[in-house]
Image (cartoon, rainbow, N blue to C red):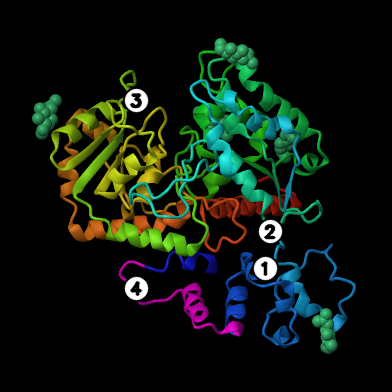
Amino acid sequence: MPRMDAANKHDAGGSGVLRPSQICHLVIISTAFWALVFCLHSGMQGGGGMVSKLFKASALSHPKLSSSIPVSRRRPPSEQPPASVAPENRSVVAPAADHCAGRYIYMYDLPPRFNEDLVRGCRKLSPWTDMCSYLANCGMGQPLGDEGGVFSARGWFATDQFMLDVISHCRMKRYECLTGDSSLTTAVYVPFYAALDAGRYFFNSTSTRDALALDLVDWLVQRPEWRAMGGRDHFMVAGRTSWELERKADVDEEWGNKLLSFPAIRNMTALILETSPWNRSGFGNEMMQSWSSLAIPYPTYFHPETAADVVAWQDKMRKAERKWLFSFAGAPRPGSKKTIRAEIIQQCGASSRCNLFDCGSGASCYWPGGATRVFEGSDFCLEPRGDTLTRRSTFDAILAGCIPVFFHPGSAYTQYTLHFPSDPNKYSVLIMHTDVTRRNVSIEETLSKISPAAVKAMREEVIRLIPRVVYADPRATRVDFKDAFDIALEAVIDRVAKRRRSAAAGQEH
Ligand SMILES: *[C@@H]1O[C@H](CO)[C@@H](O)[C@H](O)[C@H]1NC(C)=O
Ligand SMILES: *[C@@H]1O[C@H](CO)[C@@H](O)[C@H](O)[C@H]1NC(C)=O
Ligand SMILES: *[C@@H]1O[C@H](CO)[C@@H](O)[C@H](O)[C@H]1NC(C)=O
Ligand SMILES: *[C@@H]1O[C@H](CO)[C@@H](O)[C@H](O)[C@H]1NC(C)=O
Ligand SMILES: *[C@@H]1O[C@H](CO)[C@@H](O)[C@H](O)[C@H]1NC(C)=O
């Protein structure tokens, strides 16, 4: 995939074997225009959009190109070449005209009560605080400076962790393959701000909490676009956890709303921050297909526009001086029996090699630079569960080149299968929480046994993950690397395409 290379070129140890896309990258650097066009095309089998991003269509219809562009990409049946083009020129024009084939998305124009009205009512979005400043800049929040060298000069914002619906909508408005033609559509995007809706009513009755989600279901199932596949080609981004969106019973004591429990919504694909831990015995494609929700990374403070910004940040993190073996940033959860934060705070506080950033006692975890500064100075970052299994902090740590230490496989391995390497040992450490609580396992001892060479290799893997876990600036018109959103969207398109093929073959998938 050519879009990845610029941000991913510092392969650890350099295996000496170049993947085809890396060869393309080198060729691109050597500025051979024709070879570039060839590379883009050969690397685009799965459907990249690079050509249209780099060149106007006119560049591609240059007559000399006719023999160098393989015309292997299928044109959607309903799409005719422009009438003004003479037959002999069609093979030249076609690849540029249909680079979206198989990637067309139809985006609903929802009534404003499902999205824009929530933004307008931002003062009432949270029982705790005024959310208005977080909605600025397409959901990235207010721009930050480099915060005394903690961040870099460009691309940092005070982003709230539950803003992905807004960020994604903004991004989709600029998606290059939007269509109004349902015969071309691969997937249908529902820009409902589910996370903002859910956040408003945590302490109200279940009927208040579920009202807008029910309203959405009623609206959706009446659309002709819905009836085509019973919503199985629809997707949405609901930037919260299943704990907040997938209530099982109608009792006020249970947390969250019922959005993801409604049968109609279960036909769709929901991209959420953490999927339900139940029923996940394994991972891989088969599991993912039977599930309506897919987990995607929490947003962090970094929203780079270009691969160059990512590479500069990766270099800074490679060079960061890491004085601490490990660190923990977070608050205790005194009432919770589920988390081992108390043990972690105790062990970290007692170790001269652990940097404790205790949000419960004075240290401000609201200053975005605070925890990141701690992570940048540590080899390992402890990521115990909080209210739920996953934490945004995991992604802040990865961004800082700090190797995450998990205490439960559900905190990452069963969640972010699209974005993380399949081998957890490559980029993280697992110390089972039961080993800490029942066997008094020492975190310091466990981590200090890992050889410096192994630490270095893991850190390099973590740093290579950075472009895959950041959400690029959604306002940018030219993002030249593959980010967390691109990866998730590809998975959605893949899944819907499979469903479509099965439906065409008369099977349910
Ligand atoms: C089509 O091809 C002819 C020659 O083959 C050329 O003169 C003409 O400019 C081409 N038209 C376009 C739109 O590229
Ligand atoms: C939700 O609960 C709050 C606090 O009890 C109350 O002020 C508000 O009116 C309730 N909202 C709705 C829509 O019922
Ligand atoms: C969900 O999908 C199934 C299978 O395609 C279909 O029978 C059902 O009607 C769909 N549900 C809704 C609410 O459209
Ligand atoms: C597991 O999945 C099956 C099929 O989707 C469902 O019937 C069952 O209720 C699920 N179990 C739990 C505990 O959620
Ligand atoms: C756990 O281990 C630490 C250090 O090895 C020791 O000081 C502490 O007393 C142990 N706690 C228990 C409950 O055994």
| Residue in front for this viewpoint, 482 or 42 | 482
Rendered image: mark on residue 176 = 2
Label 1 crowd bin: few (<14), some (14–19), many (20+), radius 10 Å: some
Camera-near label (4 vs 2) is: 2
Magenta region? 11-34
Circle 1: residue type: Ser
| Cα distance in 3D space between marks 4 and 1 | 32 Å
On the rendered structure, is 178 left or right of 244? Answer: right
Residue 25 magenta-highlighted: yes
Circle 2: residue type: Glu
Instruction: Residue at 58%, 46% (x, y): give it.
Output: 289
Q: Which residue is mark 4?
A: 15
Label 2 crowd bin: few (<14), some (14–19), many (20+), radius 10 Å: some
Q: Secondary structure at mark 1?
A: helix
Q: Which residue is mark 3?
A: 338
Could you tell me if the residues under marks 2 and 1 are in contact, i.e. CB atoms within 8 Å?
A: yes
Circle 3: residue type: Lys
Quadrant of picture, ligand 4: top right
Q: Which residue is mark 1?
A: 52
| Cα distance in 3D space between marks 2 and 1 | 9 Å
| Cα distance in 3D space between marks 4 and 3 | 42 Å
Could you tell me if the residues under marks 4 and 1 are in contact, i.e. CB atoms within 8 Å?
A: no
